[in-house]
Image (spheres, rainbow, N blue to C red):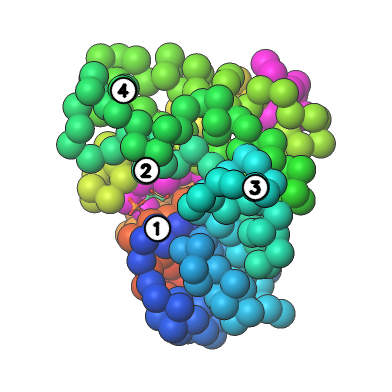
């Protein structure tokens, strides 16, 4: 089965409202003719609605960078999935390593008790289900730390994250979900994962999906690679059979770079 490539830009904590609008305005001009690749941008919560207005009628879709699992109530700081939907989102990233607290120089042992946002596989799973319930599609991120890779535990970590993060979806939800494999050590570091290795781990993820949801879902599910994706390495990564797209950080902040990655797909 052929899967439509999906390139999403995670702007993280970058771009003011006006900068975000300028970025998508430029991007629209560069990729207006692209129809064989799904494209989304994920701005900050404060700019998501305005950027959503700016891309109306274009081939660029909108996503949130995270969500809470409750729909409303006394949850200071949080954003409900229905609010993202209302702001024009179709997508939401859940379980990014930067919300799991699995990044930076905090060492692995300390980090396991220092999850900055209290994120764990259980909350990632709850967020994904809440996203589906609100009519959004989650982009579910997973990835191993450098220490976990060096200890030879990459597959074990990924399988355990995926089994917990993807538990209990309906078949229809599982068919729609998008998974992003983002090795933590490759994020924002310029150290891209070797394309064969990234493809291999995406294959491990596809196997977990197969075990949980069957062949047809494993065949249909789109798995993105994320971590230092750039115009110079995108074509190579995206040529791999198990890599169906990219979740792009730094290179999504410049329209020409992001457009080049989209065109490479
Ligand atoms: P970089 O592309 O900056 O490495 O970030 C990847 C990422 O974390 C996307 O979510």
Report if the beta carbon of the residue with label 1 is closer than 8 angstroms to ligand 1.
yes
The disc label shown at residue 169, or none: none
Callout 4: few (<14), some (14-19), or many (20+) C-alpha neighbours within 10 Å?
A: few
Is the residue 162 above or below the residue 134 in the image? Answer: above
Report if the beta carbon of the residue with label 2 is closer than 8 angstroms to ligand 1.
yes
Q: Is residue 153 visible?
A: yes
**Label 3, label 4: how many angstroms apart (C-alpha)?**
28 Å
Residues at badges 4 and 1 in contact (C-beta under 8 Å)? no
Q: Earlier in the sequence, mark 2 or mark 1?
A: 1
Q: Nearer the viewer, mark 2 or mark 3?
A: 3
Residue drawn 59% across the image and 81% down it:
54
Task: Find disc 2 in the rendering and name its residue.
Answer: 98
Task: Find disc 3 in the rendering and name its residue.
Answer: 73
Q: Earlier in the sequence, mark 2 or mark 4?
A: 2
**Label 2, label 4: how many angstroms apart (C-alpha)?**
15 Å
Q: Nearer the viewer, mark 3 or mark 4?
A: 3
The residue range painted magenta reads 211-229
Task: Find disc 1 in the rendering and name its residue.
Answer: 12
Label 3 sits on a secondary structure element that is loop
């Amino acid at each position: 089965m052929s899967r439509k490539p999906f390139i999403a830009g995670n702007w993280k904590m970058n771009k003011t409202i006006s900068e975000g609008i300028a970025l998508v305005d430029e991007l629209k001009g560069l990729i207006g003719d692209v129809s064989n690749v799904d494209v989304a941008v994920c701005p900050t919560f404060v700019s998501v609605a305005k950027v959503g207005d700016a891309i109306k009628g274009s081939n660029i879709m909108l996503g949130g960078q995270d969500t809470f699992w409750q729909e409303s109530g006394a949850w200071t700081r949080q954003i409900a999935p229905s609010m993202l939907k209302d702001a024009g989102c179709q997508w939401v990233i859940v379980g990014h390593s930067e919300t799991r607290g699995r990044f930076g120089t905090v060492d692995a042992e300390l980090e396991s008790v220092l999850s900055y946002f209290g994120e764990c596989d259980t909350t990632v799973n709850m967020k994904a289900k809440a996203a589906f319930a609100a009519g959004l599609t989650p982009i579910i991120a997973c990835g191993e730390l450098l220490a976990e890779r060096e200890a030879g535990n990459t597959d074990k970590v990924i399988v355990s994250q995926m089994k917990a993060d993807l538990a209990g979806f309906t078949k229809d939800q599982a068919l729609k979900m998008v998974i992003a494999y983002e090795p933590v050590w490759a994020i924002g570091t310029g150290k891209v994962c070797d394309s064969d290795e990234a493809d291999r781990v995406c294959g491990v993820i596809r196997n977990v999906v197969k075990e949980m949801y069957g062949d047809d879902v494993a065949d249909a599910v789109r798995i993105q690679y994320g971590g230092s994706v750039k115009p110079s390495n995108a074509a190579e990564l995206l040529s791999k059979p198990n890599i169906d797209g990219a979740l792009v950080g730094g290179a999504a902040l410049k329209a020409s770079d992001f457009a080049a990655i989209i065109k490479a797909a």
